[in-house]
Amino acid sequence: MAAEARLPKPGWLKVRFAGGGRYAAMKELIARHGLHTVCEEADCPNVSECFNAGEATFMVLGDVCTRSCGFCSVTSGRPDGVDYLEPLRLARAVEVLGLDYAVITSVNRDDLPDGGASIWAACVRAIRRRVPGCRVEVLTPDFEGNWEALRTVVEAAPEVYNHNVETVPRLYRTVRPKARYERSLELLRRVKDIDPAMTTKSGIMVGLGETAAEVLQVMADLRAQGCDLLTVGQYLQPDAKHLPVARYWHLDEYAELKRAGEAMGFRHVEAGPFVRSSYHAGEQARAAGRGG
């Protein structure tokens, strides 16, 4: 991969500069509470915009992932133990920030019997106790198909349950070698089985070599599981060690995916080159009728 030349970025694809406004203050607060954000760990292109708006997606269970996906810049390896005080620090940070909508994600913790589900549930409950008016969205891994672990998180009652399929089935072996497309679909279906009223959400990256027809089929598969919300964004290569960009999708193509998704019955579709799973998450939830 390192030897392949990168595709030149189109003129309209400009990554935002990280800095200004509340950016430094947000970074300091997150560090002071011993927390991690996927905004920083995954080199999100929206980090400046979101930090300046006082928004962040908190990453729990450490910053070392047991998986090594071809698209992700989060460090992979053997994680340390579990910090059982993390939910309390997270809730305190949400309070200090004055958030009314908090998004939580994590690294994969395949080293833990429940994949970290008990910490997930503790985080949701700690936020509710400390900031009763705050709505919570979770973006979880697949827990390796441990459906009791899934139940633990669902029964903590987040407003939105997000799990990304990331790419089309044909590319899973390259993009997500330790994941299974069918398992991700089953997870989203089982969330609805446990709590039919819970809003579910998923996300797709484009630009890894998929076709438009394949993306539309994934969208249809997600709707078949009752998935309510969808995000579609452009894959951006973090560095030469990760998968190269196969092509950059045009703005018109994102607009077409949005129209197609809404026609399929998604309650809200966020599609664009810089869209990520938690980008404008609170606005997406409100558009889907989750209040706030």
Image (tube, grey):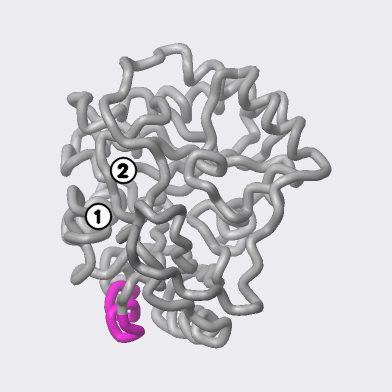
What SS does tag 1 mark? loop
Circle 1 packing at 10 Å, graded few (<14), some (14-19), many (20+), is many
Q: Foreground residue, 274 or 282? A: 274
Tell me where residue 196 appears, x and y as whole percent.
Answer: 34, 53
Position above or below: 243 against 106: below
Tell me where residue 246 appears, x and y as whole percent.
Answer: 37, 74
Q: Is residue 260 left or right of residue 67?
A: right
Query: At 61% from the left edge and 40% from the top edge, which residue is drawn?
Result: 56
Q: Main secondary structure of the magenta part?
A: helix
What SS does tag 2 mark? loop
Circle 2 packing at 10 Å, graded few (<14), some (14-19), many (20+), is many
Q: Is residue 27 left or right of residue 129?
A: right
As for residue 111 lying within the magenta part, the answer is no
Query: At 42% from the left edge and 23% from the top edge, which residue is drawn?
Result: 122
Amino acid type of disc 1? Arg
Query: What is the residue that sits farthest to the front in this orientation?
Result: 3
As for residue 216 lying within the magenta part, the answer is yes
The boundaries of the magenta stretch are 211-219
Query: At 31% from the left edge and 82% from the top edge, which residue is drawn?
Result: 211
Tell me where residue 76 appears, x and y as whole percent.
Answer: 31, 36
Query: What is the residue that sits farthest to the right in this orientation?
Result: 21
Tell me where residue 282 appears, x and y as whole percent.
Answer: 61, 51
The quarter of the image holding the N terminus is bottom left
Q: Are marks 1 and 2 in contact (CB under 8 Å)?
A: no
Q: Which residue is mark 2?
A: 141
Query: At 41% from the left edge and 40% from the top edge, which residue is drawn?
Result: 74
Amino acid type of disc 2? Pro
Q: Is residue 230 visible?
A: no
Tell me the distance, in whole angstroms, between the alpha carbons under discs 1 and 2. Answer: 12 Å
Q: Which residue is mark 1?
A: 176
